[in-house]
Image (cartoon, helix red, strand yellow):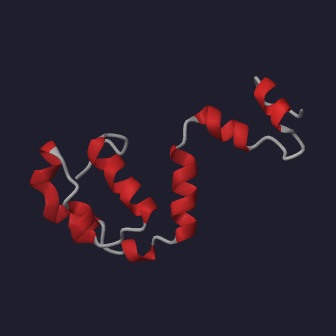
Amino acid sequence: MVTDLHGVTGRDIMDHLIAGERNPKTLAQLARRRARRKISQLEEALEGAEFFTARHAALLATMLKPRSFTLLRSVPERCDERGLKRFSGVGAC
């Protein structure tokens, strides 16, 4: 199977799940290098992907964003555009 979720194969599968792909055979075909030898196992592991909802996709997309961008998005909306440009850490503007 995929031993490194943040490797090329794992990331491609997660990106396609985020984009809405749910077909286990299609997702398994994204396998690269050594993972290509395990396509049938990947298909089996990806069974049930149809239960991966838009909510799951949004959560996964947020988790895969660089930490700094996620922190910026958590700043309260009261920060104006000028405040965001000066923002250099976590906290209120």
Point out the image quarter for the C terminus.
top right
Q: Is residue 85 left or right of residue 39?
A: right
Residue 36 percent coordinates (x, y): 13, 52
Number of numbered tags placed on the structure image: 0
Q: Residue furthest left?
A: 37
Name the one closer to the observer, 44 or 88.
88
- Picture quadrant of residue 22: bottom left
Name the one closer to the observer, 22 or 44.
22
Q: Is residue 28 left or right of residue 5?
A: left
Q: Does any portion of residue 39 appear in the rendered image?
A: yes
Which residue is drawn at the image coordinates 77% and 28% (left, top)? Answer: 85
Name the one closer to the observer, 93 or 42.
93
Which residue is drawn at the image coordinates 36% and 47% (left, top)? Answer: 11
User: Taking 4 as reference, is 57 above or below it?
Assistant: below
Which residue is drawn at the image coordinates 71% and 37% (left, top)? Answer: 72
Residue 87 percent coordinates (x, y): 79, 27
Residue 41 percent coordinates (x, y): 18, 62
Residue 78 percent coordinates (x, y): 90, 44
Q: Is residue 28 left or right of residue 38?
A: right
Q: Does any portion of residue 3 appear in the rendered image?
A: no
Which residue is drawn at the image coordinates 69% and 37% (left, top)? Answer: 71
- Picture quadrant of residue 65: top right
Q: Is residue 63 left or right of residue 15?
A: right
User: Taking 42 as reference, is 75 above or below it?
Assistant: above
